[in-house]
Amino acid sequence: MAATTPPTTTPRPAHEIPGYGTPYRKRRITTGAVIRETLYYGILIVFGAIFLLPFLWSVSTSLKPDSQVFTDPIQWIPTSITFDQYRQAFETVPFGRYFLNTFLIAGIGVASNLLLGSLAGFAFALLNFPARTILFRVLLSSMMIPGVVTLIPTYIILRSFPLFGGNDIVGQGGLGLLNTLAGVILPGAAGVFAVFLMRQFFLTLPSDLGEAARLDGASEMRIFWQIYLPLCKPALATLAIFTFQAGWNAFLFPLVVLNDPDLATVQMGLAAFTYNNSTDFGPLMAASVITTLPMIALYVYAQRYFNQGIAFTGNK
Amino acid sequence: MAQVAAPTPTPGQPSALTGQPGSDPTARTGQNARYGRVQARMGLVFVSPVLILFSIFVILPAFAALYLSFTDYDILTPPEWVGLENYRRLLTDTLFHRSFQNILLYSAMYVPVMLILSILLAMALNRKRPGVTLFRAIYYLPVVTSPVAAATVWVWLLNRDFGVVNQLLAYVGIDGPAWLANTQTALISVVIVTLWQGIGGNMIIYLAGLQGVPQDLVEAARLDGASRLQVFRDVTWPMLRTTTLFVLTVTLIGAFQLFDQAYVMTQGGPGYATLTPVYRIYQAGFTRLDMGYASSQALILFIVILAVTLIQLRINREQIYI
């Protein structure tokens, strides 16, 4: 939205007036200022505590021995630390296996979205081909279709996928791609968001680079792979993180496609664990912590790409 | 969103109209024409994987959903055309009505609080002050957690006897309710959890929007004697209209599709208090294999969401061409 409004139509008179950009208020330490500062940071800290509380409390609970989990008044910090809750969580639910499944789903999803999304984004931004505009518009407007509308037909399409899972050539007789990791990966292998994000990024790159290489006889594939793609690292990093997050945290779609307990994702495992052991809060918190930890680690490691991605969504 | 669809030709970019590479229209040499053909072919090759997947998993399902909504289909026997029967059933399906009531009530609580808190936090953190980056990171942290894990942790926090929330309330002399077991508070609990998880994302979007508000303008208004409140009302808020419209739409669309938290925390209960449309669609389609009927519910939900989106696009367009 904001991206297409004519830039710099807003008057910026203060720029031209000398002496404006400088601070107009000298900071003096007054009682009012002290109260304001205290209030400002006080409010930030109260909100911070609310946002952090669930994290801290789940970690605290997960490290307690059973006897300290259910106490009244509550015990904020465990007096002795034990990993029993984690052991019990892993013994009840095969989280190791679920981790592997989820890493495969999220990881392959990232790889295919980066590759196919940037290929298509490059073409939509920098190559001329028939029906380019109309195809892109169709892709973009499909973002208005909520996932729940396509959920049931997608399930049926996966079930009748020809020549897979015991199906014949017309997709009858077996379960198709249901109950396979491929069935979860394939429908999201090239999301419209990936194409859109990459196209917007390629549009910011100069087209002369490609023209020069073209005159030198480079193929389009080479121009894409060797000239443009290396310039896309920030966009690719953002896309990778968002795709991974979506894959790691997805719940409803894997729940529908995967019936085999051996193929379940961490989110499915955690939900089933919550459903079956609704009062075993020690192991439940341990399971929640290990389910969340990979995303937290990724966030801490790559925080600026998260912020760029969100800002991009906001500026559509 | 739709505005972006119009390709914005950058200088030096091949024109989409002529199909000619390069910006010089006089250079129609044989070599250039050959480049054009190669580009046209490679362009189609490059987009074809996306288009194939898109046709199979978006276009086909969208039309199939429409078709299925007019059929009786249990996946084991071929679909049977029943005309408007599914939609007729929806008219008298009290649980379907209940799910929409719930989601409207949920949105009425969730959306305003979400907007107010995310804009306030964004304004508080849109300053160059020590610690601001840390607070941004802390407020955003819940966004990266999964809805399932967040719901699980909050079930424990909202526990009647040993939960942190009720213990904290007890400090100030309030006897907290059995949040999730009580029909009065179950939906509020879901509101709390989803707010906790969603505010950080919208806060970042508002922070990006606030970057577009010229600081000089704010300072000039302050110099002219306007109070902070007046500056917000007359300068900041009007300039955030596009951002607000976007946040409002996306938040509302997301709210209408609530599922994960309702599934994990309360299984739609107690007494259908947290039953949502997506939950109903899931139950109809995958626990009762009533896929035709489930599709008709999905289509109704789609129409509601589409209406919200179109209203937003309409307002946005009016605003841009004012």
Image (cartoon, coloured by chain):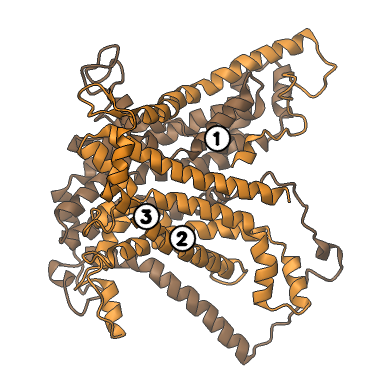
How far is mark 1 from mark 3, CA to CA?
27 Å
The numbered disc on residue A140 is: 1
Q: Judge from the rendering whether residue A145 lies leftward or rightward of residue B320; answer left or right.
A: left
Residue A18, percent across and down? 87, 68
The chain holding disc 1 is A
Residue B243: which quarter of the image?
Answer: bottom right
For label 3, the SS is helix
**Residue nearest the observer in this picture, B161 or A73:** B161
For disc 3, the neighbor class at 10 Å (few under 14, some 14 to 19, many from 20) is many
Answer above or below: position of A29 versus A137.
below
Q: Chain A appears in which tint?
A: brown
Q: Is residue A62 visible?
A: yes
Q: Position of residue B4 (x, y in %)?
A: 63, 39
Q: Looking at this view, is A26 or B187 the one in front?
A: B187
Give the vertical position of B158 relative to A276 (above or below).
below
- Which residue of the protein is positioned furthest toward the bottom in this rendering? A31
Q: For the N terminus of chain B, give its image quadrant.
A: top right
Q: Secondary structure at mark 1?
A: helix
Q: Label 1 sits on what residue type?
A: Leu
> Mark 3 — on which chain does it sit?
B
Query: Which of the marked residues, 2 or 3, is nearer the chain's N terminus?
Result: 3
* Label 2 close to label 3 by CB (< 8 Å): no
The location of residue B286, given as percent across then percent down, is 24, 37
Q: Residue tagged by mark 2?
A: B111
Report the Cα–Cα distance between label 2 and label 3. 11 Å
User: What residue type is disc 2 on?
Assistant: Val
Q: As drawn, is B302 to the left or to the right of A251?
A: right
Residue A83 seen by the camera: no
- Marked residue chain, label 2: B
Residue on which the image places disc 3? B103
The residue depicted at 47 percent of the width and 54 percent of the height is B251
| Chain whose colour in the figure is orange | B
